[in-house]
Amino acid sequence: MCSALEHHKQQEYCRTRLTYRQGKELKAVKVYTVANESSHLLIFGVPKVNLQNEVKTLSERYGTIEFCKCVTKEMCEKIVLEQFTDVFHVKYNHIERARRAKRFIDRLEFYGGILHVSYAPELETALETRLKLQKRIHEINHRLKKNQQNSQNL
């Protein structure tokens, strides 16, 4: 298995978290940095029965997408996949929409399969990465200014 694509592997759920921090559902513990997040998503576990239109419709619920395409053949060369499933590459116009889609689509039951969604920053262009980082810097500066104004008003 290629170590560069290790982040697409679905992790086990955390069973050692303290009870008061566990929440209603078990979750895998994974930390994302700004560089790890992406407007490109890979959706694993889609049953192999020609569901491209359905995946596109599901993805469009969470925001405008640029494209939705099946990349099973390309992914088979890089990582081991489940036998009767497809992988789809979905690109959102805005990273916020991709975050939301990942949160709601991951672990969703879909036509008899359970979907697994992961960010795919390796599919970004250099320009997309640069814009993503610049946008994050702008957001942080805006929050800092807002916090300074709130603390001065108190």
Image (cartoon, rainbow, N blue to C red):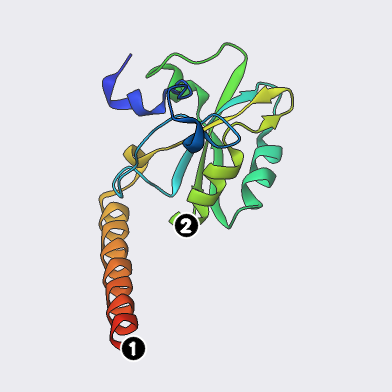
* Above/below status of 110 relative to 129: above
- Residue extending farthest top: 83
Compared across the picture, whether 138 is left or right of 72 comes to left
Which quadrant holds residue 68? top right
Taking depth in this image into account, of 35 and 150 the one nearest to the observer is: 150
Res. 42 in view? no
State the residue position of label 2.
96
State the residue position of label 1.
153
Compared across the picture, whether 46 is left or right of 94 comes to right
Earlier in the chain: of badge 2 and badge 1, it is 2
Q: How far is the residue under mark 2 from the one under mark 1?
A: 30 Å
* Above/below status of 137 relative to 39: below
* Above/below status of 144 relative to 78: below
Q: What residue lies at 49% left-to-right and 16% top-to-bottom? A: 81
**Label 2 secondary element:** helix
Find residue 122 and report its horizontal and vertical position in percent: 32, 38
**Label 1 secondary element:** helix
Q: For the residue marked with disc 2, what is the amino acid?
A: Glu
Query: Is the N terminus in the top left, top right, bottom left or bottom right quadrant?
Result: top left
Q: For the residue marked with disc 1, what is the amino acid?
A: Asn
